Image (cartoon, coloured by chain):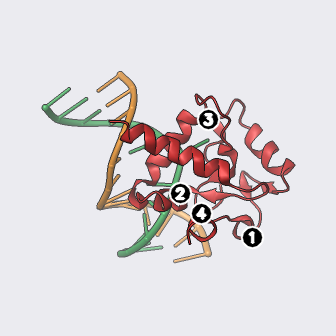
Chain colours: A red, B green, C orange
DNA sequence: CAGGTGACTGTTG
DNA sequence: ACAACAGCCACCT
């Protein structure tokens, strides 16, 4: 019943836990939630993040290559890059520079 | 009810 | 190294 909503809330919770200046990918969140094969669902959940009462740093969530694939879903396509750059994350050609360096893994930071 | 889509990822050519 | 194909699951038409 509330399972689905719980999954969404779970994704939002992890997204809010992402430290400033850090980014992660959908697969990492999905895996942390036990749905490693549902990386797409994480993106779908982010789509609902806009509707959430609490703000969700969806701009800190990108695909595995660090590309701002979801920027089109923000209020404005440049908002995502603006926020990332403001947090110290350099973005070029819709891709995060040194993505590996800014990568934040919930499994490594939250688990254990 | 069936088909198509998508803020993805991993494997193969 | 890059390009293309397939697997995956929830939501929409």
What kind of element bears circle 4?
A: helix
State whether residue A45 is above or below residue C11.
Answer: below
Q: Are marks 3 and 1 in contact (CB under 8 Å)?
A: no
Q: Does the image show residue A68?
A: no
Q: Which residue is mark 1?
A: A101
Which chain letter goes with mark 2? Answer: A
Q: Nearer the viewer, residue A90 or A57?
A: A57
Q: Which residue is mark 4?
A: A106
Q: Earlier in the sequence, mark 3 or mark 1?
A: 3
Q: Earlier in the sequence, mark 2 or mark 1?
A: 2
- Asked if badge 1 and badge 4 are on a common chain, one would say yes
How far across and down, in percent of the image, does residue A25 sit?
59, 58
Which residue reaches farthest front? A112
Question: Which residue is rendered at x = 63% and y = 28% of the image?
Answer: A53
Q: Are marks 3 and 4 in contact (CB under 8 Å)?
A: no
In the picture, the disc for residue A73 is: 3
- Is A52 positioned to the left or the right of B13 in the image? right
How far across and down, in percent of the image, does residue A37 sit?
39, 59
Question: Which residue is rendered at x = 43% and y = 37% of the image?
Answer: A5
User: Which class describes the residues within 10 Å of circle 1: few (<14), some (14-19), or many (20+)?
Assistant: few
Give the mark toward the camera: 1 or 4.
4
Q: Does the image show residue A91?
A: yes
Q: Could you give the CA–CA distance between mark 3 and mark 2, rounded to whole angstroms?
A: 19 Å
Q: Which residue is mark 2?
A: A29
Q: Are marks 2 and 4 in contact (CB under 8 Å)?
A: yes
């Amino acid at each position: 019943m509330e399972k689905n909503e719980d999954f969404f809330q779970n994704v939002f919770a992890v997204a809010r836990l992402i430290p400033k200046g850090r980014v992660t990918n959908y697969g990492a969140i999905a895996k942390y939630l036990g749905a490693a094969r549902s990386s797409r669902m994480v993106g779908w959940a982010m789509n609902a993040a806009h509707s959430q009462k609490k703000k969700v740093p969806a701009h800190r969530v990108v695909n595995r290559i660090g590309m701002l694939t979801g920027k089109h879903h923000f209020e404005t396509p440049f908002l995502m890059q603006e926020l990332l750059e403001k947090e110290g994350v350099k973005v070029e050609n819709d891709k995060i520079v040194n993505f590996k360096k800014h990568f934040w893994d919930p499994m490594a930071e939250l688990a254990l």
